Amino acid sequence: MRVGLLVTCLIDAMRPRIGFAALTLLEAAGCDVHVPHTQTCCGQPGWNSGERRSARDLAEKLIEEFEPFDYVVAPSGSCVGMVKTHYRDLFPGEGDWLARVEALAAKTWELTDFLVNVVRIETLPGDFHGTLTYHDSCSGLRELGVNTQPRALLAKLPGVELREMPDCETCCGFGGTFSIKFGEISAAMADAKCEHIAASGADAVVLGDLGCMLNIEGRLRRRGDTRTQVLHIAEVLSGRAD
Amino acid sequence: MQNQSMHFQARAGRALADVRLQGVLKRFGSGFADKRDAARAAYGVDAFEELRTASAAIRDRGLEHLDSWLLRFEAEATRRGTEVRWAESAEDIRAQVLEICAQHGLKKAIKSKSMVSEEAGLNAALEANGITAVETDLGEYIIQLAKEAPSHIIAPAIHKDLDEVADLFATHHQRPRSTDIEKLTREARLMLREHFLTADLGLSGGNFLVAETGSVALVTNEGNGRMVTTLPRVHIAITGIEKVIPTLEDLSTLNRVLPRSATGQDIENYFTIVTGPRRADDADGPVHMIVILVDCGRTKLVGSDMKEMLRCIRCGACMNHCPVYQTVGGHAYGWVYPGPMGSVLTPVYNGIENALDLPQAATLCGACHVACPVKIPLPELLRTLREKQMEQRLRPWTERLGFAVWGFVARRPRLYALAASLGVRVLSWMGGSRGRISRLPLGRGWTRGRDLPAPEGRTFRSLYAARKFAVVYGERRRRAREARAARVQRGDPRA
């Protein structure tokens, strides 16, 4: 099966190793993975800020780049949420585009959701040893229903002990441009998340969206916590977490 | 009530710095949300979903033909002796209530909780005209003593802690200070009783208006609503036109979803349906009953791209589930309605230019949408408002320019790749050996409260291209090696 890997702009720039982790996992699952080299951004920043023009342009670009594949997979709930639930709002009343949007939406998957529900992966390359706590990032959880999938995958790693934190489904305060426009509130929300992570007693917090990772890690370090690791689920599952 | 939403940023800052308020907010935490979850589980998660769907449909059915249902309500209510009035603006509400007071010679009002009366700033108008207005909902009573506005639509004094209430009561009741909750409650009851018995006007809101019977339905937990609607000579119910629902059957569905969503109760302590004034053989009830149907910006929403907001049944679930509300409290929002529903209603009722921060002050996490008993797509509505701000050029030019540049570059993969690789190199260098940036010149909003983990230094695309090149190049070399070995084996002189 030909799978297009939507790397996402944030992973491309900030944490390429997560992109490679996703690649490793998809290849381990037997997928024929393709990475369109012209890909940039799904348009989410513009869409969430009410700037329809850039969102629409980038949506058209992404649709053209990824529609040749059998599946499109991204290691990010929010980018997949953008494609699956919001793209249709960018093409109101445009039958041809809407048909293409729907076709793409139907074959676009968040990474853990894809591994569990499409390829039904059995053995994972990862061999993480330690205690983890999982943060449910908002878009993945509420737009896509990603909740049991990452936990089921973590359960396949014998060295992992999952210690749930209180309010694991509460937003970490990232919210895209919100984190800059309302930095103080955002940091206070991240602070509450850090306290919950600490309460879990886990060595690392693992999650599926890089925006939230940067927010949580940034706040943890500012609080003086240099011990707690912040890992992407793909890093843990692929064996690329150090 | 004067709209202070333009100062959201500053008010939120003060709320964050207020140690006592932060303590209260932490303790309140997800209390209501947890209770709602428990009630939902007890009802059955799937059944509750069906209930939400049915409730949203009922609201839509009423709203689709709002004009007809309102006229039906008016006809049925009038037939049963209720006087129905219409108010277009806050000023209109104040004028009409004062007119009724003058007409009936009313001097003292007892009030059951009404957010619409907050919209109208009714208490101040009554006081200015020599009419005493006493809030009888315990929370409202507390904040009336404190001369504050509600910070939550169903728990108006949620921002006050026990010590503050004890101080307020000691000052205003002139009795020994107590921090025993039961004693304080009893004290409030004692103080309020006198008012209940001496008032000539009862002012209430209305949770629903039932068109087929011309009734006003009220839900309360303290019983004060019943006193307000039965004891005084005149009862005025003030409520928004969007509260009309077609039938009593609809009411029974909505009253399943409302208390569960609000406080996690199966049913409120008091559920009252008021249909007209006292009849000849009634033991009690007001001599006159008046319903004021309020517009105050609501008709602007009918049939618009924000129409789903009219479904709102004022349960407060959205704020109970909102992480921003839980971090800054209700007063930061600056007007009558806080939290997600307030961030939609405030700009819509008061003008989009008068509440610029509110639609932006959300992470669009979706917790409100999932909790809403009538499935209002609150994050979508906030996003729509952001789009209107952008269209009306109400966002800073820097932000608009930023997106224009982003859109331009992100559509050009080569330029994008170049910009990204330069950008991550600079940021990576700034991160130094610790791998994090503590001060970012153009990203103070981020770095004031947290570090920015630095990028790794190279983009995925460049690493992937290098890897692919290595694979292809390696493959070519392997093939060449194999070919040479084959030639050697064959004794080919070219080897």
Image (tube, helix red, strand yellow):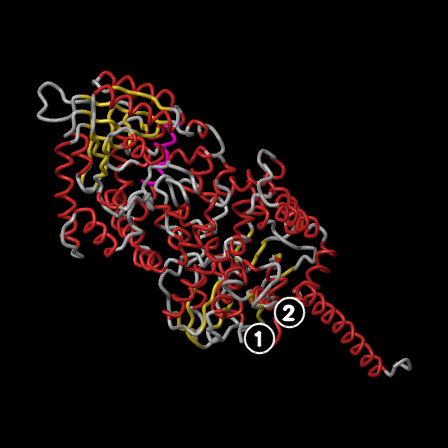
Residue at 45%, 30% in the rendered image = B301
Chain part drawn in magenta: B51-63
Magenta includes B54?
Answer: yes
The amino acid on which the numbered mark 1 sits, given as a three-letter code, is: Arg
* Cα distance in 3D space between marks 1 and 2: 10 Å
- Location of residue A25 with respect to B262 vertically, above or below: below
Q: Where does the C terminus of chain B fall, quadrant-wise?
A: bottom right
Residue A215 at what x, y percent from top left?
Answer: 51, 62
Q: Of the numbered discs in the image, which one, if any, rests on residue B434?
A: 1
Q: Residue at x 58, y 68 (%)?
A: B437
Q: Quadrant of residue B109?
A: top left
Which mark is first along the chain, 2 or 1? 2
Query: What chain does badge 2 belong to?
Result: B
Q: Is residue A142 left or right of residue B229?
A: right
User: Dot 1, crowdedness within 10 Å: few (<14), some or many (≥20)?
Assistant: few
In the picture, the quarter occupied by the N terminus of chain B is top left
Left or right side of B324 for B286 = left
Please tell me which residue lies in front, B234 or A151: B234
Density class for disc 2 (Cα within 10 Å; few <14, some 14-19, many ≥20) is many
Q: Which residue is disc 2 drawn over?
A: B428
The reply to the same-chain question for discs 1 and 2 is: yes
Amino acid carrying label 2: it is Ser
Question: Going 38% across and 41% down the picture, which residue do you hit?
Answer: B337
Secondary structure beneath dot 2 equals: helix
- Where residue B267 appears, x then y in whole percent? 21, 42
Q: Inspect this view and state whether residue A3 appears.
A: no
Classify residue A24 by image quadrant.
Answer: bottom right
* Residue B174 showing in the rendered view: yes
* B205 left or right of A55 in image: left
